[in-house]
């Protein structure tokens, strides 16, 4: 069965992530969506985005859907 895995994508890339997953036969891939951007962003804001995504990621890893 493998290891539970969650892909984390920022908002503008969420649709692309779902399309690519589906094209590889993984339409049910667990994808967490976080605020954009991450690159060039202050560390404190990146941490805030990560903290805001924790419940979403835990839900996806445990089998709930976002």
Image (spheres, rainbow, N blue to C red):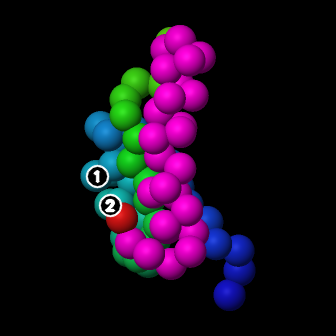
Residue at the right extreme?
2
Quick check: is 43 in the magenta stretch? yes
Report which quarter residue 18 is drawn in. bottom left
Report which quarter residue 36 is drawn in. top left
Looking at the rendering, the stretch of residues picked out in magenta corresponds to: 41-65
Label 2 sits on a secondary structure element that is helix
Report which residue position mark 2 lands on.
19
Q: Position of residue 31 (x, y in %)?
A: 44, 59
Q: Residue at x 68, y 87 (%)?
A: 1
Report which residue position mark 1 lands on.
15
Q: Position of residue 29 (x, y in %)?
A: 46, 70
- Label 2 close to label 1 by CB (< 8 Å): yes
Q: Is residue 62 above or below residue 38?
A: below
Quick check: is 50 in the magenta stretch? yes
Q: Nearer the viewer, residue 30 or 26?
A: 30
Q: Position of residue 38 (x, y in %)?
A: 48, 25
């Amino acid at each position: 069965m493998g290891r539970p895995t969650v892909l984390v994508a920022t908002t503008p890339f969420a649709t692309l992530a779902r399309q690519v997953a589906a094209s590889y036969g993984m339409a049910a891939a667990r994808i967490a969506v976080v605020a954009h951007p991450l690159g060039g962003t202050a560390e404190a804001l990146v941490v805030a985005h990560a903290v805001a995504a924790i419940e979403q990621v835990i839900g996806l890893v445990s089998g709930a859907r976002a």
